[in-house]
Image: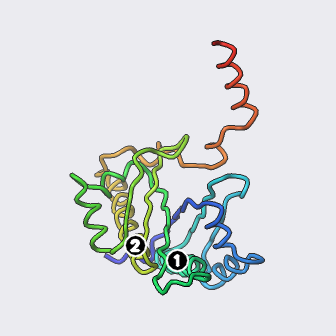
Amino acid sequence: MDYSDIDLTLRFLMNQKQASQIIGRNASNIKNLREQTECNITLSSREHEKRLLTIAAKKSISMKTVSRLGEILEAENNEYGKSTKLVPITLTLVIPKNICGMIIGKGGEALKDLRVKSGAQINMSADCLPKSDERTCQITGNNISVTQAIDLLIGIMIKAAIDESKGEFKGTPSAEIRAYDPKNAEEPAGRSEKASLCCASSN
């Protein structure tokens, strides 16, 4: 089935270095990315250690954007390298925990199949992100394999959404999933310090 016209929202977790590479000098990379793909692309505040890059568009446009993201990271990672071997890229997709079982499969067979089909290294986190019901899926390889892996993962996500709309989904309803937000995930400095002082005074 062709899902190219389905509306998608994809969220990628990035460290500061990756975010800077995507933004580019004078915001040139992200500006060009928006113009070339006509995709809604947002990046969460740099005040937080981890940043969320959000892509919202039709599936066909989203995949074009993912491919361009990979091209940017690949170019940045290999710009100053002297080796003829291409340095792999990594994209970390944020995924609701209620569909992780579909991705992993019984005995990890579905995950193994995704790795074989895409040629990418795919690793699911064991735990949810702080104060959320979402986990991360880290995808590493060259741009082609990473893009292929994400396309396959999106297919699973779409199937889960369709199953849920038909009442055939057995996991936690999407409405009950707490989305990860970097603002809520990090404890304010004052609160952490106070907690430490309380613990110290009780000993």
The amino acid at mark 1 is: Gly
Find numbered disc 2 in the image and state the secondary structure of the residue it sits on: helix
Question: Is residue 59 or residue 97 the one in the foreground?
Answer: 97
Residue 146, labelled with which disc? none
Q: Quadrant of residue 4?
A: bottom left
Answer left or right for 14 relative to 20.
Answer: left
Residue 115, percent from left and from top: 31, 68
Quadrant of the image containing the C terminus? top right
Amino acid on which disc 2 is placed: Asp
Residue 192: x and y, percent?
A: 69, 32
Q: CA distance from mark 2 to mark 1?
A: 13 Å
- Are dots 2 and 1 in contact, CB under 8 Å? no
- Label 2 Cα neighbours within 10 Å, binned few <14 / some 14-19 / many ≥20: some
| Image position of 78 with respect to 45: above or below | below
Q: Residue at x 55, y 40 (%)?
A: 131
Vertical placement of residue 3 versus 198, above or below: below
Residue drawn 62% across the image and 71% down it: 40
From the viewer's perspective, is 84 left or right of 28? left
- Badge 1 marks a residue whose secondary structure is helix
Q: Which mark is residue 151?
A: 2
From the image, tell me which residue sits under label 1. Answer: 70
